[in-house]
C-alpha cells in the first residue's frame, strides 16, 4: 500500500520535474510575452531641407494620450479632467470606460506639450501619454507633390517622404515594463528603455526661393489662362539638379485631403514625372540637335546650317499629307535655314530632317536624349513616355516625330533632353536629393552627380544654343526675351488627342527656355495644359518662363551679360 | 474522563501528525497571501482579503481538529446515517434557488450570508464515515454484491448529486474513495470486478451529458490550440511551473499571480508554489503530504477494530486522492478540474473539514 502511494507521488514528481526543469525554459520564454508591455518610442523623423538649408518638412513634437480603463481608479475625476483638458465628451469617455472589453482608449492625438504637462500634474492612474511626431510643412502647398506626405503612423506615403522613407524614418525605440494581466504596471516591474534612433535629415536640390517664384508665376498663369493644370520644372542644366518643380493645382501638405482619395490622388500626382504629353514644337530642339551633330560628323544626309529648306507648306509622306501650322502665305516660312525654321517653328523642315537622317540614326539620338526610358530621377512612378518602336516606325510617323507629334514624353524627360542639348551635350541623371546628414548633424554625405552619356558634341550644342537664343530674340519665343541675359528657348503648342482623335480646342502650350545661352545656368520648362482662349505656347507659356527667369535674376543677383 | 488526553485506556496518539497538519494549514495562509494579495488588492481593495478568511478557517479548523481528537471515534459510527443524510440534503439544497450560490458556471455552494459552504466537501467525509460504519457492522456480507450494495447506492447518489452541480473532480474523488473503501472492506475480487463495470460505463456517459468535458479534454491534449479559451487555465499553470524551474523565483516573487493564473489562491495554488519555491520546494512539500498519508495508513493498520481501520483509511484516502489529483491537474498530467489542494488552498469548508478529519485520525491513533 505504502509502496503504491509512494509510486504515485514519484509519478507526480517526475511530471513536475519535467514541466519545471526540462520544459521550464521554453515555457518561461512563452510566458515572458504576456508579462511585458511595450510602449513605442517614436523616432524623430528626419527633416527635408532645400539646397540652402531651408526647412521644408520639419517636426512638431506632439503627444498622444491613452487611457487604460482597467487601471482607472476614479472614473468621474478622470473623465472630468481629461474631458476638460482635451475637449473630449465626458459621457463618451465614461461610456467607453464602463463598457469594459476595451483595453486601451486613445483619448487624443497630437496634443501640445503644455497640455500634456498639465495632465501629468494630475497623476491620474490609467492615463498614459506617448510622444508622436507631427510633420510640419513650412511652405504648405509649395512643392507638395514632390515632398509628399506621411501616414498617421509617420511613414512616408507619397513623394520624397515615401522615396526616402528609409533615410527619414529612423528606428523606433521601445519602453518595456512588466504588467499584470490587464496592463497595470506591477510593483516589481523593471523598466527597460531602448532608445529611438532619429532619421537622417536630407537636403534636396530644390531651391525654395526659385520654387516659390515659379509657384507664383504658375499660379498666375493658371488663373489667367483658365487652364486645366499647369506645371513647371526649373533645372540646373550643368548637372540636372532639379531646382524647382511646380504642379498646380496643388494642396496644402499640412491639411492633406485624406478623406477624398480621388481628389487627393489627382492633386498629389507629380505630373511632371508621371504624366506624359505630346510635346509638339519644343521637341524640334532635339531634331535640330541631331541634324547639327550629324552634319558635323559628315553625314551627307544631314542638312548644313546654311541649307535652305523647301518652302512648301506640306509634305506628302506614305500617302498622307503633313502640313505646317502656318499657311505659308505672303512669304511666311520662305527661304528658311535651320535657324529660321526654329525661329518660325516650321513643321515640314523638321520632317525633312527626320526623314533625311532616317529612323535608325534619328532614334539613336532620341535614345541618347533619354526618350523611351526613364530619366532615373529619384522619385516614384516615373513614366516611360511613348515612342513608336524603332522596328515598327513608318516614314509618316518619323516625319511627325520630327516636329514633336506621334511621340509622348514626360516633363522631366523633355527638360533633361533640352538641357543636354544646350549644356555641351552632357546627359546626367536628374536628381532631387543633394545630400544626407546623419541624425546628430555631423556627417554629411553628398549625393553624387551621375553623368549618363554624351548626347551631342560640344560644338553642336553651342551652335544649337545660339540658334535657340535667336528664337527668343527674333522668333516665336520673343515673349521670353530679357535684355542682356541671353535667354534661349523654344515654344510648343500641341493639340491634344482623346480616344485617338484630335480633341478640338484642347492644347498643351509649352515653352522650354534657358539662360545664359553660352553657358546655361538655369533651364525652365513651362507647360500649360488646356488654356482657354489664346493657346499658342509663344503667347501663353513663354511669358511665364520670362517671369521666372526675371525672378531668378533678382534672387541670385545675376549681372547682365554684355 | 472521556475527553482526557491522558486517559489510561488510550495512548498519547500521533502528535506529529497534528503538528504537521497545523503547520501545513499555516503554510497555506502564507502561500495564499503570496498568491492572492495582488488580486485581492485590485478586486477587493484589501490585499489580505483571502488570508483573513483563511486564518478564520485555520482557527476554526484547529478547534474542530482538537475537538475531534477528544471525541472517541467510535461514537461517529452512530451518527453515520444522519450525517450522510444531512450531506445529501445539503447537496440537494445547492439546487434550491436562493440558497445555492453559483460561481464560474457551476452551483457548488450554499450561502449563509457572506459565508458559503461547499456541501460536496462535507459529503466526501460523510460518505467515508458511512461506508466505514456500514462495512464494520456488516463485515460478514461484504463478499457478496448485495452486501456492498448500500454503500454503492449511497456513493452513486452522492456522485450524481455532485456531478449535477457540476463538479467533475469531487465526483471523481468520491468515486475513487468508494472504490478504495470497498476494496479495503475485504470484499471478494469477483464482486469488486463486477462493481467496476458501471464505473467504466459512467465515463463516456458523463462526456455525452456535458459536452464541455470533451472540450476540456482536447484543451488538455493541445492547450495552445485555444490559448485564450479552454487551454488558458492549463497554459497559465504550466507557465507558473516553468517560470519556477528547479529553485523557484523566491517567496512572493511569482509573476503569474498578477492575475494571469486564475484560481491562483485556490485550486491552482500549487502552481504558484511551484513558481515561487521551485521543484525543490514542491519536493519538500510533497514529502510532508506523504508524511501525513503514511501516518494515516499506519494509524489505520494499527487500529484493532474494523471501524477505526476503515475510517482512518477512508479519511487518509480522501486527503491523498485530493493531493494527487490536484497535483496531476496543475502539472497538466490530467485534464483540468476544480479541486482544492487540501490544507493549502483558500476555501474554509475544505480546510475545516480536512483538519477535523485529521483530528479523527489522531483519535484513532490514540486507541491503538
Image (spheres, coloured by chain):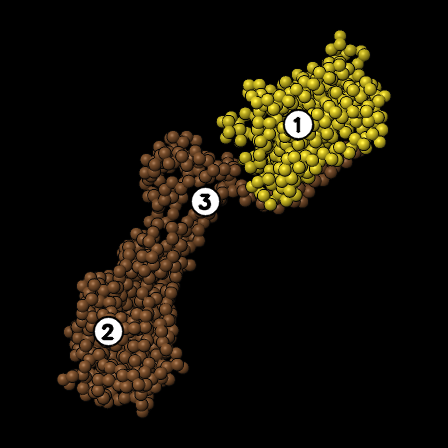
Chain colours: A brown, B yellow
Q: Position of residue B165 (x, y in %)?
A: 63, 28
Picture layout, residue B78 above or below residue A457: above
Disc 1 and disc 3 in contact, CB within 8 angstroms = no
Looking at the rendering, in which quadrant would you find the C terminus of chain A?
A: bottom left
Q: Secondary structure at mark 2?
A: strand
**Residue under pointer 3:** A39
Q: In the image as oriented, which residue stretches furthest toward the left?
A: A330
User: Which numbered marker is on residue B162?
Assistant: 1
**Labels 2 and 3 within one chain:** yes
Q: Residue at x 60, y 20 (%)?
A: B56
The reply to whether the C-beta atoms of the residues labelled 2 and 1 are less than 8 Å apart is no
Label located before the other in sequence (2 or 3) = 3
**Residue wearing tag 2:** A493
Q: Disc 2 or disc 3, which is closer to the eye? A: 2
**Element class at badge 1:** helix
Pointer 1: residues within 10 angstroms few (<14), some, or many (20+)?
many
Provide residue B76's location: percent of width, then percent of height: 74, 16
Which residue is at the front of the view, A83 or A205?
Answer: A83
Asked if labels 2 and 1 share a chain, the reply is no
Q: Pointer 3 indicates a residue of which chain?
A: A
Amino acid at each position: 500500500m505504502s509502496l503504491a502511494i509512494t509510486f504515485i507521488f514519484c509519478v507526480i514528481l517526475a511530471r513536475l520535474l519535467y514541466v519545471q526543469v526540462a520544459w521550464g525554459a521554453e515555457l518561461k520564454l512563452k510566458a515572458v510575452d504576456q508579462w511585458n508591455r511595450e510602449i513605442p518610442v517614436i523616432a524623430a523623423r528626419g527633416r527635408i531641407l532645400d539646397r540652402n538649408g531651408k526647412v521644408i518638412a520639419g517636426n512638431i513634437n506632439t503627444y498622444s494620450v491613452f487611457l487604460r480603463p482597467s487601471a482607472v481608479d476614479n472614473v468621474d475625476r478622470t473623465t472630468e479632467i481629461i474631458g476638460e483638458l482635451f475637449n473630449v465628451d465626458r459621457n463618451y469617455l465614461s461610456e467607453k470606460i464602463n463598457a469594459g472589453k476595451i483595453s486601451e482608449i486613445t483619448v487624443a492625438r497630437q496634443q501640445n506639450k503644455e497640455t500634456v504637462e498639465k495632465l501629468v500634474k494630475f497623476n491620474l492612474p490609467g492615463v498614459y501619454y506617448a510622444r508622436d511626431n507631427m510633420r510640419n510643412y513650412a511652405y504648405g502647398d509649395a512643392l507638395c507633390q514632390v515632398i509628399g506626405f506621411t501616414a498617421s503612423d509617420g511613414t512616408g506615403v507619397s513623394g520624397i517622404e515615401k522615396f526616402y522613407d528609409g533615410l527619414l524614418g529612423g528606428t523606433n525605440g521601445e519602453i518595456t515594463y512588466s504588467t499584470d494581466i490587464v496592463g497595470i504596471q506591477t510593483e516589481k516591474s523593471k523598466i527597460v528603455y531602448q532608445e529611438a534612433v532619429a532619421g537622417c535629415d536630407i537636403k534636396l536640390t530644390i531651391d525654395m526661393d526659385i520654387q516659390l517664384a515659379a509657384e507664383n508665376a504658375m499660379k498666375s498663369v493658371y488663373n489667367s489662362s483658365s487652364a486645366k493644370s499647369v506645371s513647371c520644372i526649373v533645372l540646373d542644366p550643368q548637372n540636372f539638379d532639379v531646382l524647382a518643380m511646380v504642379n498646380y493645382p496643388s494642396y496644402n501638405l499640412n491639411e492633406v485631403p485624406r478623406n477624398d482619395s480621388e481628389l487627393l490622388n489627382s492633386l498629389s500626382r507629380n505630373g511632371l514625372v508621371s504624366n506624359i504629353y505630346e510635346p509638339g514644337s519644343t521637341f524640334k530642339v532635339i531634331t535640330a540637335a541631331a541634324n547639327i551633330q550629324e552634319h558635323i560628323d559628315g553625314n551627307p544626309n544631314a542638312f548644313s546650317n546654311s541649307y535652305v529648306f523647301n518652302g512648301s507648306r506640306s509634305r506628302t509622306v506614305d500617302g498622307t499629307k503633313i502640313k505646317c501650322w502656318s499657311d505659308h502665305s505672303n512669304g511666311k516660312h520662305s527661304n528658311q535655314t535651320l535657324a529660321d525654321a526654329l525661329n518660325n517653328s516650321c513643321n515640314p523642315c523638321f520632317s525633312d530632317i527626320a526623314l533625311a537622317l532616317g529612323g535608325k540614326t534619328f532614334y539613336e539620338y532620341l535614345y541618347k536624349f533619354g526618350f523611351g526610358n526613364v530619366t532615373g530621377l529619384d522619385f516614384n512612378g516615373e513614366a516611360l513616355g511613348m515612342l513608336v518602336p524603332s522596328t515598327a516606325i513608318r516614314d509618316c510617323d518619323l516625319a511627325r516625330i520630327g516636329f514633336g507629334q506621334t511621340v509622348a514624353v514626360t516633363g522631366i524627360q523633355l527638360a533633361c533632353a533640352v538641357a543636354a542639348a544646350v549644356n555641351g551635350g552632357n546627359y546626367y541623371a536628374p536628381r532631387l536629393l543633394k545630400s544626407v546628414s546623419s541624425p546628430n548633424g555631423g556627417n554629411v554625405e553628398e549625393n553624387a552627380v551621375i553623368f549618363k552619356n554624351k548626347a551631342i558634341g560640344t560644338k553642336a550644342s553651342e551652335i544649337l544654343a545660339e540658334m535657340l537664343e535667336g528664337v527668343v530674340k527674333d522668333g516665336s519665343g520673343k515673349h521670353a526675351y530679357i535684355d542682356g541675359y541671353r535667354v534661349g528657348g523654344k515654344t510648343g503648342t500641341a493639340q491634344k488627342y482623346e480616344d485617338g482623335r484630335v480633341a478640338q480646342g484642347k492644347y498643351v502650350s509649352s515653352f522650354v527656355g534657358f539662360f545664359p545661352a553660352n553657358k546655361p545656368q538655369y533651364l525652365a520648362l513651362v507647360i500649360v495644359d488646356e488654356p482657354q482662349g489664346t493657346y499658342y505656347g509663344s503667347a501663353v507659356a513663354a511669358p511665364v518662363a520670362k517671369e521666372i527667369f526675371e525672378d531668378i535674376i533678382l534672387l541670385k543677383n545675376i549681372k547682365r551679360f554684355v | 474522563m472521556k475527553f482526557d488526553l491522558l486517559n489510561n485506556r488510550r495512548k498519547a496518539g500521533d502528535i506529529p501528525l497534528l503538528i504537521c497538519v497545523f503547520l501545513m494549514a499555516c503554510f497555506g495562509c502564507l502561500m495564499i497571501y503570496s498568491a492572492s494579495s495582488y488580486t485581492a488588492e485590485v478586486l477587493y481593495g484589501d490585499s489580505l482579503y483571502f488570508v483573513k478568511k483563511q486564518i478564520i478557517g485555520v482557527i476554526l479548523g484547529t478547534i474542530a481538529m482538537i475537538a475531534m481528537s477528544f471525541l472517541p471515534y467510535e461514537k461517529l459510527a452512530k451518527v453515520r446515517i444522519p450525517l450522510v443524510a444531512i450531506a445529501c440534503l445539503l447537496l440537494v439544497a445547492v439546487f434550491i434557488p436562493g440558497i445555492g450560490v453559483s460561481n464560474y458556471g457551476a452551483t457548488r455552494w450554499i450561502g449563509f450570508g457572506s459565508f458559503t459552504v461547499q456541501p460536496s466537501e462535507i459529503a466526501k467525509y460523510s460518505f467515508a464515515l458511512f461506508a466505514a460504519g456500514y462495512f464494520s457492522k456488516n463485515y460478514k456480507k461484504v463478499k457478496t454484491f448485495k452486501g456492498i450494495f448500500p454503500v454503492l447506492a449511497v456513493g452513486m447518489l452522492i456522485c450524481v448529486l455532485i456531478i449535477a452541480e457540476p463538479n467533475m473532480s469531487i465526483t471523481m474523488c468520491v468515486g475513487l474513495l468508494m472504490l478504495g473503501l470497498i476494496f479495503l472492506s475485504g470484499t471478494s475480487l469477483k464482486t469488486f470486478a463486477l462493481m467496476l463495470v458501471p464505473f467504466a460505463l459512467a465515463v463516456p456517459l458523463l462526456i455525452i451529458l456535458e459536452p464541455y468535458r470533451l472540450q476540456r479534454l482536447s484543451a488538455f491534449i493541445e492547450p495552445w490550440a485555444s490559448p485564450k479559451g479552454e487551454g488558458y487555465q492549463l497554459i497559465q499553470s504550466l507557465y507558473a511551473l516553468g517560470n519556477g524551474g528547479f529553485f523557484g523565483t523566491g517567496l512572493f516573487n511569482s509573476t503569474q499571480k498578477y492575475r494571469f493564473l486564475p484560481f491562483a489562491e485556490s485550486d491552482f495554488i500549487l502552481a504558484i508554489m511551484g513558481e515561487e519555491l521551485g521543484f525543490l520546494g514542491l519536493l519538500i512539500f510533497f514529502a510532508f503530504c506523504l508524511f501525513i498519508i503514511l501516518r494515516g495508513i499506519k494509524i489505520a493498520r494499527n487500529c484493532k477494530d474494523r471501524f477505526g481501520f476503515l475510517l482512518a483509511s477512508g479519511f487518509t484516502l480522501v486527503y491523498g486522492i485530493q493531493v494527487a489529483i490536484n497535483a496531476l491537474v496543475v502539472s497538466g498530467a490530467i485534464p483540468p478540474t476544480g479541486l482544492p489542494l487540501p490544507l493549502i488552498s483558500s476555501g474554509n469548508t475544505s480546510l475545516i473539514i480536512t483538519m477535523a478529519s485529521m483530528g479523527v485520525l489522531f483519535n484513532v491513533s490514540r486507541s491503538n
